[in-house]
């Protein structure tokens, strides 16, 4: 059995078509291509350091039977099963021993096995990247906090539905955990420092 992994990199909804960017008239934060490249490189680095990588993918049936109240807000139908836009972006290719967790709600914890997987790894700190900051990142961070994990969000590897919403969500996350907001470079340092303990 492997030694406990104090960190796990959770890649949230880095899919070919972001739900909000596919809905006309809703602004998005700029720099998506750069964030995706940063995330792809971070995944490679995490693997090198022995940090578990968990991929989260929002998926809904074409009938929308499983979408619940998600259409009550600004978003239209999104992340439809079978739509190429729902697949993970090119360059994010989960390995056979890595988990790809499909979710039907915004939080990656809600109705999924994420907590079980994190506990199996022995994870204490959840490292979040992806999108959207004000939706799936925010709600996943809140649920990680309520499951008693430390939460770290790479502010340079998340993007929101607008600059204002992105910044407000980061403030809300920091309200829950004062050390939550970090950078990709902070993630890398933490992984590198933890790596010898797992060797």
Image: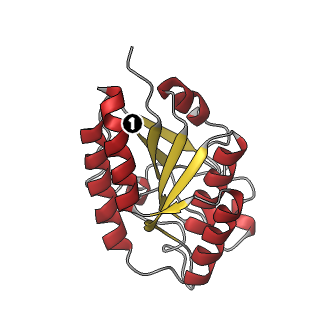
Place of residue 149 in the rendered image (x, y in percent of width and height, measured from the top left) = 62, 41
Residue 26 in view (yes/no) = no
Residue on which the image places disc 1: 52
Quarter holding residue 133: bottom right
Rendered-image quadrant of the N terminus:
top left
Place of residue 52 in the rendered image (x, y in percent of width and height, measured from the top left) = 39, 36
Total marks in image: 1
Place of residue 172 in the rendered image (x, y in percent of width and height, measured from the top left) = 69, 67
Q: What colour-coding does the image apply?
A: secondary structure
Check the image and report above or below for 95 versus 28.
above
Residue depicted at 31% across the width and 54% down the height: 42
Check the image and report above or below for 41 versus 36.
above
- Of residues 9 and 78, the one nearer the viewer is 9
Rendered-image quadrant of the C terminus:
top left
Quarter holding residue 46: top left
Quarter holding residue 86: bottom left
């Amino acid at each position: 059995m492997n030694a406990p992994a104090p960190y796990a990199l959770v890649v949230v909804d880095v899919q070919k078509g972001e739900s909000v960017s596919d809905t006309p008239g809703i602004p998005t934060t700029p720099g998506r291509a750069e964030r995706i490249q940063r995330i792809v490189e971070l995944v490679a680095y995490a693997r090198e350091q022995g940090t578990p990588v968990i991929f989260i993918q929002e998926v809904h049936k074409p009938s929308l039977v499983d979408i619940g109240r998600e259409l009550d807000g600004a978003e239209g139908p999104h992340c439809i099963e079978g739509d190429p836009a729902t697949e993970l972006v090119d360059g994010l290719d989960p390995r056979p021993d890595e988990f790809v967790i499909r979710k039907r709600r915004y939080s990656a914890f809600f109705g999924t096995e994420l907590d079980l997987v994190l506990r199996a790894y022995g994870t204490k700190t959840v490292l979040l990247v992806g999108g959207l900051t004000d939706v799936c990142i925010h709600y996943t961070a809140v649920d990680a906090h309520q499951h008693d994990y430390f939460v770290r969000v790479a502010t340079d590897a998340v993007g929101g539905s607008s600059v204002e919403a992105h910044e407000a969500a980061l403030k809300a996350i920091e309200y829950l955990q004062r050390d939550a907001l970090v950078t990709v470079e902070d993630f890398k340092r933490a992984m590198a420092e933890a790596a010898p303990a797992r060797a």
